[in-house]
Amino acid sequence: MITFENVTMRYARGDAPALQGIDVEIGRGDFVFVVGASGSGKSTMMRLIILEKEATQGRVLVAGQDLSRLPTRKVPGLRRQVGTVFQDFRLLAGKTVNQNVAYVLQVLGARRHLIKQLVPETLELVGLEGKGKRLPHELSGGEQQRVAIARAMVNKPPILLADEPTGNLDPQTSEEIVAILDRINRTGTTVVMATHDTTIVNTFRKRVVQLRDGVIVRDQADGEYEAVEEGLA
Amino acid sequence: MRLGFLLGEVGNGLRRNTSMFVAVVLVTMVSLFFLGSGLLAQRQVDTLKGFWYDKVQVSIFLCTPDSTDVAACAGGGVTDAQRDQLRGDLDRLEGLVEEYWYESNEDAYERFRVQFRNSPVLDSIPQEAIPESFRVQLSDPTKYEVVASAFEGAPGVESVEDQREVVDKLFTFLNAVSLAAVGLAAAMVVCAVLLISTTIRLTAWSRRRETNIMRLVGASAFTIHVPFLVETVLATLLGAALSIGLLWAMVQYGISGFLTDLLAGQAGMIGLIGPRDLWVITPILVGGAVLLAVITSWLALRRHVRV
């Protein structure tokens, strides 16, 4: 589903590379934790997948498309295949939960009856039924992140990227959020989650791809992650 | 994207950025007002040309008792014999002269009084000082020299004037007005372009969260850009409508009303533009407004709104 072939990424000429010769293959329906300290290149990997940035060298393939050869007009099509969730939620403050989720479908030109059907359905998926009329500031952090996940999933993309989705949440809530991602993964969605939360990684026992200074130091199924290695504990 | 959603987005944008929207409306209004004025002045020139070139072209002024400094008038005012002689000469020039008519001293003075009724010099000019004349319309206006040379210096003729020279001076003036207006319009258009692109930059900033989400979920460039474009086109169209309103008021009350009154009975003698001329240039103004909005937005969006 997502393939990195010898990918190097340098943000500016002369800078140390953010990623260096990365090779990863993520299959359809996989759940992968991308772990590593801040600055290890996790977010850069995410940015390359949605073509926010273009790799300096090597090839990134997403859903069978070589991103280095993707014409600009096909970039929106690629992004429709990938839902994204961020640490800071990025909800629209003036819109209710329903409106935030519906916004995606409206932007993509969905018909009204489809929106009416999909929005409650997706809110139920993330456990927010009955909270559609709330505004983001009336919700807890965990609930806001659920809205963000609903928004990312409402148009049913085959891939879900989550960049430090639990970074602003307490351990209990973090676990709930990852449980939702796990549930989404079980319906066949490929989930890639960047994190440096050892508890989460060790609780869920998924494949772990560990980065250090832009290089993959470990790629292990049912992996563990010891932050001690990074000097973070 | 559905129409309802688009209109909602546009409404949001306008609410957030009302002051910039108003600024774009006003700048567009002023620039199109100047452009419209220039175009109308040009149409006035054309109208006058058509009107006056068909009318009197050569005036043969006859001697007054005061014009003894001209050789042909050495004997004082024109005599009846001289006048008859000139009339005969004009009749003989049948091929060149389309028609001619005689304006007596009384008629000329009457016309002078009307023309200068607001001028303080009126009372200091005695009736004898206003020359009687033959007004000649040429069948071929370019043959002016032939007619002029036939009468210049003839007994009883004080001077021969090509009226077109006088009219052409007016045209030169109106052309200058027209050029100045179009020049100002050009400067204002530059203002409008800069203002629109600044507005789009500010709007893009205030709407960056929405735009970012649109990008992330895979909205097309068109979908992201179209609310900006619609807002700008709305603003310039509103500006165009206001400028047309101003131009209409100017033509209706300024030219058709005030100037016509000022020229009193002579309005019929002069071809003035009217509201009909405004309707002719309306498509140019509206088209210009839309073109300005679309091109400027397109350039600004490429720079300020990343897709």
Image: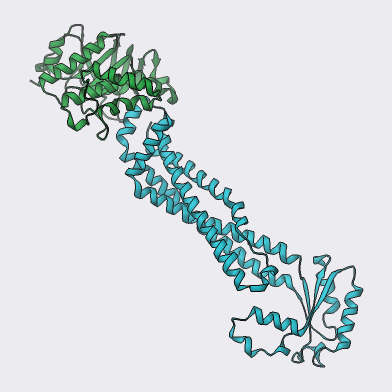
Q: Nearer the viewer, residue A202 or B16?
A: B16
Q: Nearer the viewer, residue B82 or A1?
A: B82
Q: Nearer the viewer, residue B247 or A233?
A: B247
The image position of residue B243, as x and y in percent, is: 50, 55
From the rendered image, report the letter of the chain displayed in green.
Answer: A
Q: Quadrant of residue A117?
A: top left
Which residue sits furthest top? A221
Quadrant into which the C terminus of chain A falls: top left
Q: Residue at x 20, y 6 (%)?
A: A221
Question: For this view, does B8 lie left or right of residue B47?
Answer: left
The image position of residue A14, as x and y in percent, is: 29, 30
Chain B: what color?
cyan
Q: Residue at x 33, y 11 (%)?
A: A1
Q: Residue at x 50, y 51 (%)?
A: B241
Question: For this view, does B4 lie left or right of residue B109?
Answer: left
Q: Residue at x 53, y 47 (%)?
A: B286
Residue B216 visible in the current orientation: no
The image shows residue A13, relative to residue A220, as above or below, that is: below
The image position of residue B182, as x and y in percent, is: 55, 57
The image position of residue A133, as x and y in percent, is: 24, 28
Q: Quadrant of residue B92?
A: bottom right
